[in-house]
Image (cartoon, grey):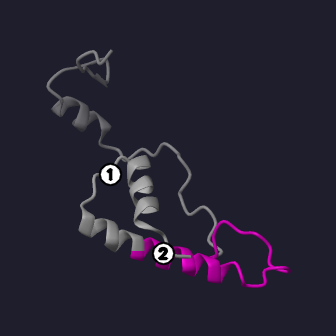
Amino acid sequence: MKLTKQQTEHIAHLARLGISPEEKEKFASELSSILNYVNELNKVDTENVEPTSQVTGFANVMRKDEVEKFGQEKELIEMAPEHQGGCVKTKPIL
C-alpha cells in the first residue's frame, strides 16, 4: 500500500503535526513501508496460536508492599526540621 502525499497530509493534520513538503514525501514513504510490513504480518497463519499480552513468561516481579522496620526511625525523625510525637511535621499540601 502506497500512501499519497494527501493521505500523509491528512494523517499529519489529525496528529496536529506541521510537516514540510520534504517531510511529506519522507513520511509517505516510511508510513507506506510500515503498512506493507503490517500487511505481511497479516499473512502469517495464527490459527492455533493463543493470544498473549507478553512472551517472556515472567509473572509480576514486584515485591510485596510490606512495611519493614530498619531500627533507625527515631534517629531519622529527630533529624527532621520539625517533629512531634514520633512523626515528622510538614507543611499542609492541600
User: Which residues are drawn in magenta?
Assistant: 29-56
Circle 1 sits on which residue?
17
> What is the count of numbered marks?
2
| Above or below, comparing residue 17 to residue 60 in the picture | above
Which part of the image, by quadrant, shows the N terminus? Answer: bottom right
Magenta stretch: residue 30 in it?
yes
Q: Residue at x 42, y 60 (%)?
A: 6
- Residue 54: x and y in percent read 63, 70
> Residue 85 vs residue 66: left or right?
left
Tell me if mark 2 has few (under 14), some (14-19) or many (20+) residues whose alpha carbon lies within 10 angstroms of its own: some
* 89, 17: nearer the viewer: 17
Outermost right residue: 48
Direction from residue 45 to residue 39 in the image, left or right: left
For the residue pair 49 and 60, the one nearer the viewer reads as: 49
Residue 46: x percent and y percent? 78, 80
Q: Residues within 10 Å of mark 1 (few under 14, many from 20)?
A: few
Residue 19 locus on image (x, y percent): 27, 58
Quick one: SS at disc 1? loop
Compared to residue 39, the image places residue 3 above or below, namely: above
Closer to the camera in the image, 69 or 51: 51
Whole-percent x and y of residue 70?
37, 47
Which residue is depicted at the point 80% across and 73% down? 50
What is the CA distance from the residue labelled 1 to the residue labelled 2? 18 Å
Quadrant, the C terminus: top left
The numbered disc on residue 32 is 2
User: Seen in the image, is 64 located left or right of residue 48?
Assistant: left
